[in-house]
Structures are given as structure tokens and as C-alpha cells.
Image (tube, rainbow, N blue to C red):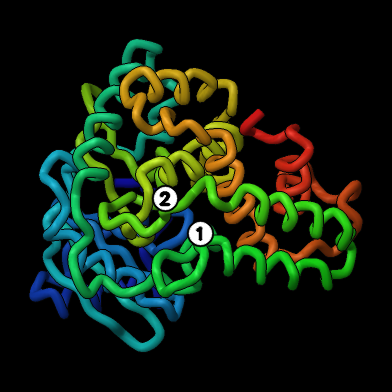
Amino acid sequence: MAGVHGTPTGLALARAKHALTAAGLDPDVELARASSVTNEVWLSSDVAIRVNRRPDKRLFREAQLGPHLPPEVGYPEILGYGTGVGFDWLVARRRPGNVLSRCWPTMSPAQQRVAVRQLAFMLRALHATPAPGGLGDINELGPQLLRTGQGMAPTAPLLAALERVTTFEHVDPGAIRDIAAWVRAHGGAIEPFDVHTLVHGDLTFENVLWDGDGVTALIDFEWARPAPPDLELDVLLRFCAYPQLHVAADYEAQTRAEAYEDVPKWLRDDYPQLFEHPRCDERLRLYAIAFEVGQLLHDPPQAAPRTLTEVHPLNRLLRLLSHRSHLD
């Protein structure tokens, strides 16, 4: 499920053992800590334990959602879910394979092509699946500051956030107002946004399993929600452009954007409907703006844009309007 590293010790191990005990499983089974970008992940020979230490209980939503996912995505059987002091946890049966992003650098082009074709098949099934009732909202609207339903335009939270960004130090308020004006002019491109079928919501190759012969599962549905299917492209295209930002630290140095250059074309060939909207470019740019502004709220600039890294959210946001971004 992820690359294994380190020795299982300390409070993190205690949380994993708490999860096993609460799920009615043997807490003394041998566990290995796995590298992960967001959660604490532990593996035994049979199960995977994920521990979320943020106060949003995103794993609760996934526990609710898991039984409703289509069999085509290979989602693992959930064995237990619960909470502890300051964390929630999910225990699932392990699926074969390792995360695709870890395997990708050593895969042949033919294997890579197969992986994208099989991923497209899984996405088609997922995007045809109605969201179950009572799923609840994602904390703070999700990765993109866009809202479904509730009698307001989907871009309303984004425009409110852009107004906040104009007050940030080291930000040119005129440039941000230009972005807000663009959002107002083009926001209709994503309407109607109130769609009742699911997207994964965090589609990086960290959340796809590969066993050497094929894709075995799409995992980690914490950000899954009802939304237009092409919203899926927002995270995936950004991952292809900046894969090093989305993988575990222990193999970040081996991860290169050049290795993912063909992925969008392959996906377009295998799942053309994701790219067929007549206002596709506007939609993808709106999604990307909504993502980068959300990131910017969490990581305000501490210096002028020219002194920040190329991949800082502010610089990525500014490039979107000047058509020098990963979408161009």
C-alpha cells in the first residue's frame, strides 16, 4: 500500500495498536511503518492501518463511503473504523501491490500505458456511481474552494477567499483582483456544478496500487465527493506537472515530471469524455485557481513572489492567469 520504512515505535505505534484492538484484531501482529504523504500508515501481512491526526475525521467519511464504491475500483474491505484521543483510524484488508508513483520510475513504457488504461476503466466506473446519502461535507469545502448546492454560485467561496488574499502581505492586490474578475467572467463554465456522482478527489499515483502486472486498487477516498467528473483532472494534471510535491519524501528525489509527460494524452485517449466539454480549458483553469487559492490560505507568502520557489501556491496562481502554468 506504501513504501515500508523505519522501526515501529512510540505514540504512532500505540495509535496503530489501539486501532487493531478496537477493530477486534490482534494488536501484537508485526507492523511496519509505511511512508505516506498525509496519514500515519502501518502495514501487517494482512491489513493496512491508517491514522488521521487532523481534527476533521475524514476517515469517517471514507468508512461510510467504502461499501458504496463500485467493485471495479478494487477498494479494500474495511475491517474497522473508530476514534481515539485526537485521531481517527481506519483498518482495511490489504490489497496486493505498491503505490504506482513508487513503481513508476522503473516501469517500462508498455507497463505505464497499461496502468493508465486500467486507471481510466476504474474512473469510468467511479464517475457513474451516485454518492450515498448522508455522506456529509468535507472540511473547508475540499481541495478546491468550490461549493455545490446551497443556493449559491459554486465560485462564491473562491471569490470570498480571493478577497482575503488581497489583504496578505507580499501579495499584489491588483493581480489578485484581476484573477477574481476572470473568475466572475468565466465562472459559468463550471455550472451546473451540483452533480450527484462521485469523484475520487485526490487522484495522484500515490493513491493507485500496482502489483507488477496491473492496477489492483484505487485507494484513499478521504476527499471523495459528488462533483463533475472532470474535476478529477485538477489534481491529476498538477500531479503530472509537479509529482515530487505529491510523493513520500523517501523517493521524492527519484520522481521526475518528465516521466509523466504522456499520462494526460493517454488518459484522453482512454477516457475522452473527461476532456470533451466545450469549455474544458476554462473549467480546468477555474478548478486550478480554486485549488491554488485554497493552498495559499494555508501557506501565505513570507516574501515577494520573485523570491519564492517556482512551486509556491502564489506563483502557481499567478501563472494560471498569465497562461504560463502547468495547463499551458
Question: Residue 159, percent across and down?
Answer: 66, 65
For badge 1, the amino acid type reads Pro
For the residues labelled 2 and 1, the Cα–Cα distance comes to 8 Å
User: Which image quadrant is residue 43 in?
Assistant: bottom left
Say which element carries label 2.
Answer: loop
Residue 130: assigned label: none
Quick check: 253 above or below 214? below
Q: Is residue 161 at all visible to an observer of this figure?
A: yes
Front position in the image: 276 or 247: 276
Question: Which residue is found at the position 33% from the left and 50% from the top?
Answer: 199
Q: Mark 1 points at which residue?
A: 143
Question: Which residue is found at the position 58% from the left and 39% from the top?
Answer: 282
Front position in the image: 32 or 41: 41
User: Which image quadrant is residue 116 in?
Assistant: top left
Q: Mark 2 points at which residue?
A: 202
Q: Is residue 224 at all visible to an observer of this figure?
A: no
Question: Residue 161, percent across and down?
Answer: 67, 69
- Total count of labels: 2
Question: Which residue is found at the position 59% from the left and 28% from the top?
Answer: 257
- What is the residue that sits farthest to the bottom in this orientation? 85
Q: Is residue 47 left or right of residue 100?
A: left
**Mark 2 Cα-neighbour bin, 10 Å: few <14, some 14–19, many ≥20:** many
Q: Is residue 160 left or right of residue 149?
A: right
Quick check: 238 above or below 56? above
Question: Which residue is found at the position 75% from the left and 65% from the top?
Answer: 300
